[in-house]
Image (cartoon, rainbow, N blue to C red):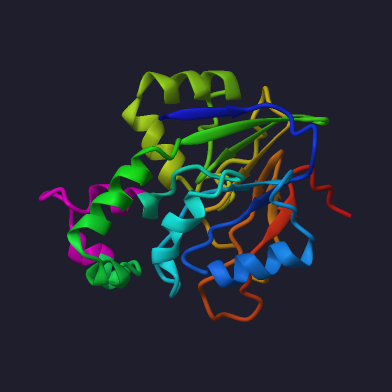
Amino acid sequence: MRFKRFSKNLAGKDYVVGDIHGTYSLLAQALERVGFDPSQDRLFAVGDLVDRGPESPDALTWLEYPWFHSCRGNHDEFVINAQNLEFDAAWWILVNGGEWWLDLDLTTRNLFSERFKQLPFAMEIETDQGKVGIVHADVPANLNWTRFVAEIERGNPAIHKYALWSRSRATGKCTTPVEGIERVYCGHTVIKGGTLKIVGNVYFIDTGAAYTFLGARLTLLPLAYQQS
């Protein structure tokens, strides 16, 4: 699956969470604090479900929850590529927090790979405020949301790579909003200080859950978040 749409939640609330990176205990605590109701609420994630954090294997369990939905991050792509002989697994494991992978048996590795292949590169959710997009890294500056989605669905490898890896807006190289959508939530680039970064209508919410720097935390927001 390359792209997924969700209709408006008419029963409960929708939330979005930054890069989890194997910190599922933190996520559970955050959901408890906001009174998350799994019978009617939904949780959307910006990807990077695994690596660096101690509970990366728990990602499979969370993906079974019918109320939990994630797009694909670059670390999730590492899992998909792990058994490709051309993939530099040593670089992933030694530099990018993939040590947990070594403890898995072949059956579990295959389960991870197949499940992560189902993660879309982008998601779109209907809300009372309009359509909200979720993509792991960024949307190209020369594409509005409709064209971006069309390229994702067409299987354009350059756009897939951009959606997983770009830091253009997060690092200030691009400051324009994404036209054709109310807002977009992204992760990938760690925003230090524990606060999200907003560039136009793009919200960067990876605040370093699996890191130890001052202010590092997991960001969980209402999908219709309004900055005070």
User: Is 149 or 168 nearer to us in this picture?
Assistant: 149
Task: Tell me where residue 157 sits by quadrant.
Answer: top left
Look at the image and say whether residue 82 sits in the magenta stretch. yes
For this view, does 196 lie left or right of residue 227? left
The single residue placed furthest to the left in the displayed view is 85
- Number of numbered discs on residues: 0
Tell me the residue at 43%/26% (across/down).
152
The answer to whether residue 49 shows anywhere in this view is: no
Please report the residue visible at 22 percent of the width from the left and 54 percent of the height from the top. Answer: 82
The percent position of residue 41, horizontal first and vertical second, equals 73, 46
Nearer-the-camera pick, 17 or 63:
63
Which corner quadrant of the image does residue 1 belong to? top left
> Can residue 152 be seen in this snapshot?
yes
Look at the image and tell me in which quarter the C terminus lies: bottom right
The foreground one among 173 and 54 is 54
Quick check: 28 above or below 85?
below
The percent coordinates of residue 215 (x first, y second) are 66, 76
> Residue 171: where, in percent of width, then height?
55, 53
Magenta-colored span: 77-92
Compared with 198, 139 (above or below) is above
Residue 27 colored magenta?
no
Give the residue furthest to the front.
39
Report the residue at 15% width, 48% height from top: 84
